[in-house]
Amino acid sequence: MLILGACVIAMMVAWGVTRLMMAWAKPDLPDEARKLHTIPTPTSGGVGIMAGLLAGTAVLLLTHLDGASVSSWQAFGACLSLALAGGALGYWDDRVGLGARLKLGVMLCITLGFILAGMRIDSLPLWSGFALQFSPWLAGLGTLMWLLVMVNVVNFLDGANGMAMGCSGIGLIFLAMLSAEPAGIGPAALCLVGAAACLGFLYWNGLGGRVFSGDAGALAVGLLIGGLGVWAGERGANPWAIALCFLPMLSDAILTILWRARQRHNLLTAHAEHVYQLAIRTGTSHGQISLIYWLASAMCGALAVVTHPLGPSAVSASFGLALCGFVVILTQSRTILRKRLSKQIG
């Protein structure tokens, strides 16, 4: 009940602060061909998510002061600090438009600080009875890659109303199920508070796109997912199951990068070549495409939760099969949508 109360507070605060940002925030102008909106829209609504996250965690702190170990509080603080620092960087970028090098440099400092605090995954189970064991350096490098991939994936998918934050919230709920503990403070509690904060924001973003999360939201939520995934992995959750909870977003983002690399496009330039963007450009509504990705996220999360108790072999097989399915579906969808778009332009 206490965690439920924290989630309600997080959702309400996120709802209220996001509404305030609609009046105060700098507008995102539809001044580039890649952008899918047609009127100036307030951005930095992710500040509402951060406010909700802070409010919900304050409730957790007040109600669980004596119910967790020192290591749990350290991990809790590391994950929360990671998300808030990323969100602050994103808000700074929303306001003044940071250069790519400066933004990357600050992001590396934030993520390396998280790793130096002792947060990393040291092993990767492949099947029952066999797992890759990593040295501290390799574990740190792998954790860094996971954090950078996850924050960029959320940022890349944050181009349709409700999509990125909806998929993130759904994934966090299933990640909470993977890492649930009988008592005390663990990653599950922070996952649920984060999901509730995303839900409070979605009221304004998912219904007509009246405010965007901006980099403030994308970086905060992306790093929250990344950090909580690492903490859950340290507590025994299978890393493949963790990634499976967010596989629809990961698949679209990574396959798009690979497609652009094959086409010899500049990977550092902004674009509108993600499958969900192609779908919207050919007439699919924001709501329809977001609903498809939400359902896919829920199915992947459920698959992760169901197979996790069966052992590493079941999880690895499920991840591999789901990934193959997304490769086929997204590749075929890209081909069909690009042909349809060419006919519209021609």
Image: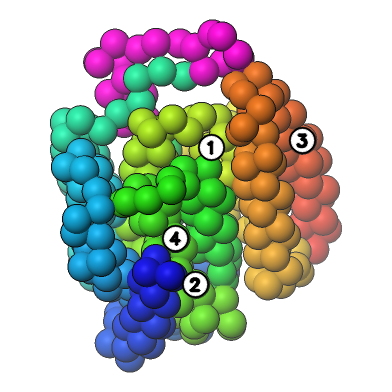
* Circle 1 residue: 243
Q: Earlier in the sequence, mark 4 or mark 2?
A: 4
Q: Amino acid at mark 3?
A: Gly
Judge from the rendering whether residue 73 lies leftward or rightward of residue 133; answer left or right: left
Contact? badges 4 and 2 (CB < 8 Å)? no
Q: Residues within 10 Å of mark 2 (few under 14, many from 20)?
A: many
* Circle 2 residue: 199
Contact? badges 3 and 4 (CB < 8 Å)? no
Q: Earlier in the sequence, mark 3 or mark 2?
A: 2
Q: Residues within 10 Å of mark 4 (few under 14, many from 20)?
A: many
Give the residues drawn in magenta, as a range: 125-148
Residue visible at 20% across and 30% down in the picture: 118
* Circle 4 residue: 192
Measure how far apart labels 3 and 4 are at the Cα level.
28 Å
177 to 146, vertically: above or below = below
Q: Which mark is residue 325?
A: 3
Dot 4 falls on a residue whose secondary structure is: helix
Q: Amino acid at mark 2?
A: Leu
Q: Nearer the viewer, mark 3 or mark 2?
A: 2
Dot 1 falls on a residue whose secondary structure is: helix
Q: Would you say residue 185 sits in the magenta stretch?
A: no
